[in-house]
Amino acid sequence: MHRASAARRRPAFRRLLVAQGLVVLVMALVASVVSGVDALISTLAGGLVCLVPQLYFTWRLGSVRGGRQARRYVSNFYRAEAGKFGLTVALFVVVFITAPPSNPIFFFSAYVAALFVHWLAPWLLRERPTP
């Protein structure tokens, strides 16, 4: 019984990740219509540079819960955040060295738009009443 109530209190990060993915896909569709395939590829690359570190952070943070293990949770949170930052820097380097975006405005627009979805986190992560 206690485990079920703890599972209900955990935020559903899946909604946030899906919202970020949908924003990137909509931007990619708009970019492909406006500027063609090169803009589509640049937009998808920018979105992935934002989404992959976020997925890592969510995976890393999901292994430990708060409560009795608060110290371990905080330590894991900082490690996850440091890993997310390092992965973001590495992905930027990889993208700009191996395959520079042909249209940087779409690349950075997709990155920033996916990043700004976090502003919707309080709305996306709140508990929804069940009918």
Image (tube, rainbow, N blue to C red):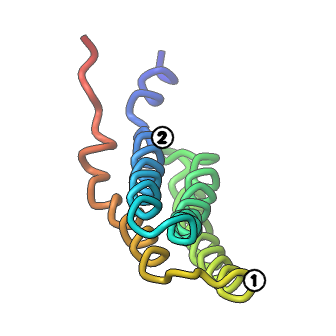
Residue picked out by circle 2: 14
User: Considering depth in this image, is 26 or 57 the residue closer to the camera?
Assistant: 26
Checking the image for residue 75, the label placed there is: none
Q: Is residue 61 left or right of residue 126?
A: right
Count how many numbered circles sit on residues in the image. Answer: 2
Query: In the rendered image, which quarter is residue 11 located in?
Result: top left
Category of crowding for the residue at label 2, using alpha-carbon neighbours closer than 10 angstroms: few (below 14), some (14–19), many (at least 20) = few
The extreme right residue here reads 98
What amino acid is found at the position of numbered circle 2 in the picture?
Answer: Arg
How far across and down, in percent of the image, does residue 84 sit?
Answer: 59, 70
User: Considering depth in this image, is 12 or 91 the residue closer to the camera?
Assistant: 91
User: Considering depth in this image, is 6 or 46 the residue closer to the camera?
Assistant: 46
How far across and down, in percent of the image, does residue 111 sit?
Answer: 45, 71
* Mark 1 element type: helix
Look at the picture and state if 115 lies above or below 21.
below
How far across and down, in percent of the image, does residue 98 sit?
Answer: 75, 83
Q: Residue at x 31, y 52 (%)?
A: 121
Residue picked out by circle 1: 98
Q: Residue at x 24, y 45 (%)?
A: 123
* Mark 2 element type: helix
Between circles 2 and 1, the one closer to the viewer is 1
Q: CA distance from mark 2 to mark 1?
A: 31 Å
Q: Residue at x 45, y 30 (%)?
A: 6
Indicate the quadrant containing the C terminus: top left, top right, bottom left or bottom right: top left
Mark found first going from the N terminus, 2 or 1? 2
The extreme top residue here reads 131
Q: Is residue 86 left or right of residue 33?
A: right
Look at the picture and state if 119 lies above or below 67.
below
Look at the picture and state if 14 lies above or below 78.
above
